[in-house]
Amino acid sequence: MSSAMETRILTIDLGKQSYDIYIGASLLSRVNDFVPSDLEGRSVFIVTDKNVTSYAEQVATDLKARAHANVKIITLPPGEKTKSFSQMQKVSEFFLKEGLNRNSVIFAVGGGVIGDLTGFCASIAMRGVPYIQVPTTLLSQVDSSVGGKTGINTPQGKNLVGSFYQPDAVLIDIEALKTLPERELLAGYAEVAKYGLIQDASFFSWLEKNAKRLIALDQEALAHAIETSCKAKAIMVETDEKEKGRRALLNLGHTFGHALEAEAGYNGTLLHGEGVSIGMVMAFELSRRMGLCTQEDVTRVETHLQDIGLPTRAGYVSGLTTNVDALIDVMRRDKKVVSGKMVFILTRGIGDAFISADVPEKLVRDVLFDSLGGHEKIAKEAKGQCSSKFSSL
């Protein structure tokens, strides 16, 4: 990749909480150019994980050399389990022990886990300290770093403890994706596809033609996809910052996906984007069974996600042992539940998603059962090809 590309700038317009998103190359080595306030002599805290310490050190080197900032770094284990009470306590205590004050600035350098955890810690430290998102995965660049959602997971579900707390800036360095494992890159792609499926059919058509360029890290394809995704999210955030209405559309597939993640134990069996991929197919299938969209829509979505290398059925994921009742229990604890009713993002077709709390639970169970491979396993069992029953369903 060349570092000659022009830096693109998007603004999230939230009045006094407005901030800019910078999309470009080689931003990590010139972070001080994009920080919205003077860091001269201030204490700076960088939260990162063991997979991206070299990027955190690039940020630290630039801030020390050009802003003369007093930089301290805390490095956490990688993976979804880091979004926990124990790691939140560890980071918070590190801040306080090392002299964090309201004049400090916090940087989150990493993927969605680091961004969510760091943002939450920033929101509660000293009742709120400025922080800057430096996302290093595709998923965090197009989704989790933008919009101010922060939080941690609990055994009861994903992101059930957290806050809305906007960053001061988001710095998206496309070159950081060069070291991202392919599986993580594909998981991030699910969130890119989501924007087309929600409300931009033309973008989804573009992805069908250009997704492999994006996965091959073609600079122009990446920049276009990231900018388009961030613009779509910016509009949602500006009109519905606290997710009281339309912003919930961004959860297409997430009600199903979060339940699968929780049942998998956040142990790496299922990445967030993989759960979203499976969940989006289930959301389209649920919509089809409700007479809202066509089988052609479902097939088109599933075929595209499969072609790019993402899982589209829960039963395809090795080691994902779960059951419908357990998944329903997790889904009932979802943040979107209203008056005891599960809320789903449904669709009338590609690019035409909407929110609904009027979904028959039997259909939800049927969709889960089929995604887990229930009918297929029952058929094999009847032919004597399956040694154990899918009895947990």
Image (tube, rainbow, N blue to C red):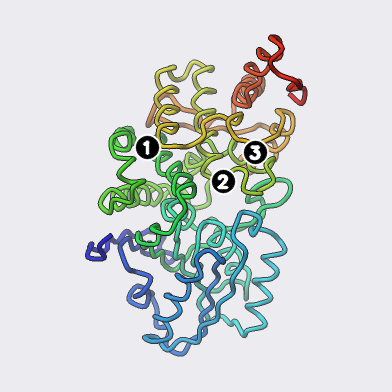
Q: Give the number of the mark in front: 3 or 2.
A: 2
Going from N to C along the chain, the mark reached first, 3 or 2, is 3
**Image quadrant in which you'd find residue 127:** bottom right
Q: Which mark is residue 282?
A: none
Q: CA distance from mark 2 to mark 1?
A: 21 Å
Q: Give x and y (percent) for residue 231.
A: 34, 50
Judging from the image, what secondary structure is the residue with disc 2 in?
loop
Which residue in the protein does label 2 denote?
271
Which residue in the protein does label 1 denote?
196
Which residue in the protein does label 3 denote?
259
> Within 10 angstroms of label 2, few (less than 14), some, or many (20 or more) residues?
many
Q: Nearer the viewer, residue 144 or 321?
A: 321
Q: Is residue 149 above or below residue 260?
A: below
Q: Give x and y (percent) for residue 199.
A: 37, 36
Q: Quadrant of the C terminus?
A: top right
Amino acid under disc 1: Gly
Going from N to C along the chain, the mark reached first, 1 or 3, is 1
Q: Give x and y (percent) for residue 248.
A: 51, 41
Judging from the image, what secondary structure is the residue with disc 1 in?
helix
Q: Give x and y (percent) for residue 106.
A: 52, 74
Q: Is residue 8 left or right of residue 278?
A: left
Q: Nearer the viewer, residue 389 or 6?
A: 389
Amino acid under disc 2: Leu
Residue ID at (44%, 31%)? 306
Going from N to C along the chain, the mark reached first, 2 or 1, is 1
Q: CA distance from mark 1 to mark 3?
A: 23 Å
Q: Is residue 146 visible?
A: no
Q: Residue furthest top?
A: 383
Residue ID at (33%, 51%)? 217
Q: CA distance from mark 3 to mark 2?
A: 12 Å
Judging from the image, what secondary structure is the residue with disc 3 in?
helix
